[in-house]
Amino acid sequence: MVHGSGPGKGDLVSGISRRKSEHLNIVSEREVEHRGGTLLEDVHLLHEALPELDVEDVDTTTEFFGRRLSAPLMITSMTGGAEFAERLNHGLAGVAAEKGIAFAVGSQRVMLRHPEVISHFDVRRNIPDGVLLGNIGAVQLLEHSTEAVAGLVEAIEADGLCVHLNTAQELVQAEGNRRFRGLLYGIARLLDRLEGRLLVKETGAGLSPRTLERLAAIGVRYVDVSGSGGTSWTRVESYRASNGPLKNVGETLGDWGIPTAVSTLAARSIFGEEGCIVASGGIRHGLDIARALALGADLAGVARPALLAFLKGGRQAAMEYITMLITELRTVMVLTESGVAADLRNAPRVITGRLRQWCSALGLSVE
């Protein structure tokens, strides 16, 4: 990890850019999916053949960070610091604006030392009236002042900041951080400084009940469970690693994590009605979104599918993918007689398989 003296500005920026570019290439070209699944497939919503509901009456709008979204969906943080990141962030922010959903930029870590790269993240003009969130790794809270990190929000005129937890990835990454003591205290200080405008998220390994309880105890209101079932960053790092111990660790822990469905249920159980829960990690279609909302999520988040669509056909392809997600969600809402998105939480359902087993082991209600 780069500290104070040593490599110069160009070395740091190019080093981060090279790593982020490697991440993008691996995520888009290799088999990086968690093999255990999200367990959302174990959520079976009951079909209603006689819905007292017209399609045009379905209302998918919701509130998030003080703004109104057209659909309970966010394009979640992907990358920052890579050469391609600027085009990606600006393009997907525009998609989010047009579809009325939320958008979060990739990690702004590089901006803490080199604010001149702000063009990678300064996408407010692309999403002038929508929810825009900044992003920083929790480990950076140990290296930079609370004021400096809070400044990332103001620099890009964001509505709030995502703080991502990626301990598993850091431990498999050769240049990763090995210090984690004090992260909760750092989050608490930043939460106070930003007056609650903070979303704490995992990066594909899920949030356990214990972690969720700790976050709730310090007053965190927004969480993104980012459970296992989607991109496995331990597996991504195993592709980057040279042959040796870290490569083996990444392969061994390639399926490490808590499934998205489990973390979503746990989050709603712990936060009650006070919290705002985002379910991401393996969300692939509108039925996944509906299942996540049925388990207690307020929003769902997607990353890799939006990236792949953008790589394949630019902004238009990404737009078509997001449109498909929303159309599928609206269809499921009619089929479950859910007039508004929140109604899905009370939609009749059956929980089966491994999700029921996980919930039984953790004492989570599936009724």
Image (tube, rainbow, N blue to C red):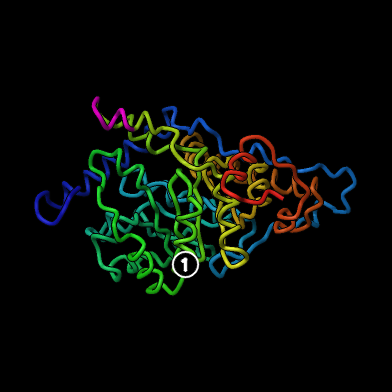
Residue 114 picture location, percent across and down? 23, 58
Q: State the residue in front, 287 or 359.
A: 359
**Crowd around label 1: few <14 · some 14–19 · many ≥20 (10 Å):** few
Amino acid at the residue labelled 1: Ala
Residue 271 picture location, percent across and down? 56, 63
Residue furthest top in the image: 243
**Residue at screen point 42% across, 54% down:** 105
Residue 167 picture location, percent across and down? 35, 47
Residue 27 picture location, percent across and down? 41, 34
Q: Which residue is mark 1?
A: 217
Q: State the residue in front, 206 or 175.
A: 206
Left or right? Give the position of 61 relative to 277: right
**In this rendering, is residue 224 above or below 27?**
below
Q: Is 245 contained in the magenta span?
A: yes
**In this rendering, is residue 169 above or below 122?**
above
Q: Quadrant of residue 14?
A: top left
Q: State the residue in front, 355 or 302.
A: 355
Q: Which residues are magenta?
A: 243-249
Q: Is residue 319 visible?
A: no
